Every structure is written in C-alpha cells, then in structure tokens.
Image (spheres, rainbow, N blue to C red):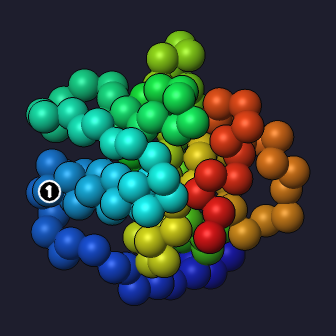
Amino acid sequence: MQQKPKPETLGPKSTDKCLIGDYWEYHVAMVALEKGAEVYRNVVCTGPIDIVLKIEGEFVPIDVKQKAWSYTKGIWLAPKAANKAGIVWGVAVNPATKQISWYYVSGGNPTWNRPSSIFQCPVGLEGFWDD
C-alpha cells in the first residue's frame, strides 16, 4: 500500500510542543468566543484542562489537541484519548484547515457522514463547532 502525502499545514512551524499547543488553544478560544461562549484559559501548559468554556450557563472543560496525519489512511485523525473520566472533553483541530471538532467516539474524520451522537461532548453541544 502506497502512503498518502501529508497536506500542507497552517499554524506554527515550530516543533516546540508548548508553542504548538498554545497556538491551537488560542485558536479554539477565539472561535468559541465568536460562537458566543465565555472562555477561561489555563495559565500553564500542563494539566488535563486547557480551556473552560461557559456555553448557555454550562461549564465545559476541554483538552485541545492537534490532529495527526495518518499516512496509511490518508486523513487527519484525532488522538485516541477519550473523555478523561468524565472530567474533560476532547477537542481536535485539523492543522490543514483549522477546523475544530469534538472527538469522535472511535476517532475518525469529521468529513465522514456520521450521526452527531457519535461525538464525545456534552448533550446538546454536538453542533457547536459547525461552521
């Protein structure tokens, strides 16, 4: 099987994981603000919670991760980590498009035609990141 080439990515060109993480956290925070959420950021780059969103009166702690390119599948995949014991919700950013999505129950690609119930997110917020 021939590997599929990785598309060009947006965002920082640095390899510093803290810088990359901070960049995508700020991106998610700005998009959440534009969608009407209140945003509370973590002040350090360690810990399970990167951002806490307040959406319609509900506090939603999230962990922001950059998707990784799968050379064998030819798509961007979210990390395998799931909702950490019901404490924090995973949000994945595609570095080629800057598209944000909740984690899927079994990983995957947000361009697939899947029902919204497949997302790992608070009930009622399945479409929050939709454009």
Residue 59 sits above or below residue 19 on the image: above
For this rendering, which residue is in front, 98 or 31?
31
For this rendering, which residue is in front, 69 or 1?
69
Corner quadrant of residue 38 = top left
Which residue occupies 37% across, 33% down? 52
Residue 14 sits above or below residue 7 on the image: above
**Which three-letter amino acid code belongs to the residue tagged 1?**
Leu
Label 1 sits on residue: 19
From the viewer's perspective, is 39 left or right of 106? left
Quarter occupied by the N terminus: bottom right
**Residue farthest to the top, as pictured:** 85
Which residue occupies 59% across, 57% down? 129
Residue 59 sits above or below residue 94 on the image: above
From the viewer's perspective, is 69 left or right of 19? right
Which residue occupies 72% across, 69% down? 111
Residue 49 sits above or below residue 101 on the image: above
Where is residue 99 drawn, in percent x and y? 52, 68
